[in-house]
Amino acid sequence: MDLPEEIFVDAGNLKKGPWTSAEDAILVSYVSKHGEGNWNSVQKHSGLFRCGKSCRLRWANHLRPNLKKGAFSPDEERNIVELHSKFGNKWARMAAQLPGRTDNEIKNYWNTRIKRRMRAGLPVYPLDIPKCASAAQYCYKQEDGRKMGTRVDSESEFASSLTLGEPLSCQLNSLHGGHQVRSFYPITSISDVPPLSTVVANEGLGGVGKGIGSLLPNIKQVCHSPYGETDSRDGSVLFSQLSDVSSETLHAGSYTKASQTCTHNSVRSAIASLFTGEPDPFIVPYDGANGFLDMPFHSFAPSASLKLELPLSQLAESAGTCGSAITSPLMSLPLSRQLPLEADSFGSSASDFLEALMKEAHPTIGLDQVRTDLIDQLLVLTSGNMSTEVAALIGIDKGRWGDDINPVATLEACAFGHREDVSQNCCIGCVAEPAIQPLLPSVEATSLSASQVAGPRVDDILAEVPSGVCMDENYVPVLDFPSSDVVPEWLSPPSWGYPMHLPC
DNA sequence: AACCACTACAACCGCAGATCT
DNA sequence: GAGATCTGCGGTTGTAGTGGT
């Protein structure tokens, strides 16, 4: 057979790029004689200068018999949506259920469909698609079995979780008269998710405990910071100062990517793995019918393999899409490179790690702001499982609060803006100067005002918290928002409704 | 006609598990 | 048992085609 010269290249330089019909003919001929498999020998014995992987792909996706060509039929489209709701991004598994279709075809179809629907503001899944496993691919369970959560890594996943048939609520935990109180707020879109919240699927509010918990600390920090809108204070100044962000990259990515990057913020990943001591959490499969499998829970620890290459500037852009801006100074760390996730990467001690972390902070950010945000993020990341070691690390040693005071709850008090109320006892006052200062030799406090750096700080915002809020006997805040007129603006309806207090 | 944005699709890459030597 | 190789999978990128301005 005469073959075009371009098929043959110098030995060792295998051809890449589109396949020609002549190459296809060679491959078909070879497979018909020798059968599938042994793909690396194709190049050796057929004279085709393609690597084995390329041959296999070409055969599987284009040349093998019984392949369906052309657009998906409505039935096939429906099948794909249903299969995706069952399997998630398991393209090969889906392809096995769709005769004549390849995983690549299905993957391409799904990705373009997702983009199209999200651009149109439509849910990823039609409402009549039954909820299966996809929205709960990554689920976490606490050791005591009480808390359940789903890590939602992207806008699409979140959209899935919102549209699979179960209404969702945001949950705020607070304490009232010594009893823990959960406040639930209905949410209908990602923009309804408030900060420091837990999203739950409410199978009726009374059934929250068995619902699907979608803990969304990262998403909220990216898209739902209470710290203001996209004005000069929203952090965009900080983003624009990053030199390694190309405008091309800036405008190329989809919101999904931005969300992932936010979620996988290197700082958060690093801190989380520091807390858990492991690069990855236990991932608990969620079965739509039977709930979570019993496995230990290890707090939030984003996967160590997450990519962090999206420029932060994109986050600012996407933040506009979903309501408000990212303002945390820690979010100004250049994410175009990946921080090592293991604490060991920064030395043997956690303080080395934190020091490195703080050194990464933008140099123009006030030390106070960095510290405040770090504490906030530690709280979110630990999800109530902060170890004594970590608490001590950030400056709250057991000796300061005694056996009967929960450092986590106390820190939450700080995050909710009551640092002044409790600082003499155990709160941020302890964290602030003596404890964390030695960790920060290279971070210079500056004279920049808060408005020059980011948005208002937690305590600025929560100065608006109603005066009825006080601390209980354990220095834990008793949070209550009795009516909408005293709720801080970022907590106010109609964006995520009126609180409903339920006893736990 | 030129440019641009968008879509659909093909192909590549890195990784991980399976299998072979 | 260990290393090498093969295979399959999922994510990502590149590009041709199309339609709008």
Image (tube, coloured by chain):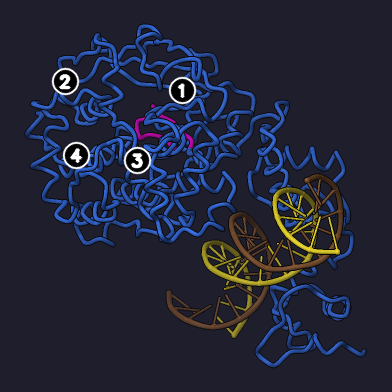
Chain colours: A blue, B yellow, C brown
- Examine the rendered structure and indicate whether residue A84 appears above or below residue A501: below
- Examine the rendered structure and indicate whether residue A17 appears above or below residue A185: below
- Tell me which residue sits at (31%, 18%) in the image: A174
- Examine the rendered structure and indicate whether residue A398 appears above or below residue A469: below
Residue density around tag 1, few if under 14, some if 14–19, many if 20 or more, within 10 Å: many
The subunit letter for the residue under badge 1 reads: A
Dot placed on the residue nearer the N-terminal end, 3 or 1: 1
Q: Nearer the viewer, mark 4 or mark 3?
A: 3
Dot placed on the residue nearer the N-terminal end, 1 or 2: 1
Residue A475: image tag: 2
Please give left or right for residue A247 compared with residue A2 in the image. left
Quarter that holds the N terminus of chain A: bottom right
Amino acid bearing label 2: Tyr
SS label for mark 1: strand
Residue segment shown in magenta: A140-150
Amino acid bearing label 3: Ser
Question: Looking at the image, which is closer to me, A361 or A270?
Answer: A361
Read off the residue under disc 4: A391
Q: CA distance from mark 1 to mark 4?
A: 27 Å
Q: Is residue A223 magenta?
A: no
Q: Nearer the viewer, mark 2 or mark 3?
A: 3
The subunit letter for the residue under badge 2 reads: A
Please give left or right for residue C2 compared with residue A178 in the image. right
Read off the residue under disc 1: A170
Amino acid bearing label 4: Ala
State yes or no: discs 4 and 2 in contact (Cβ < 8 Å). Answer: no
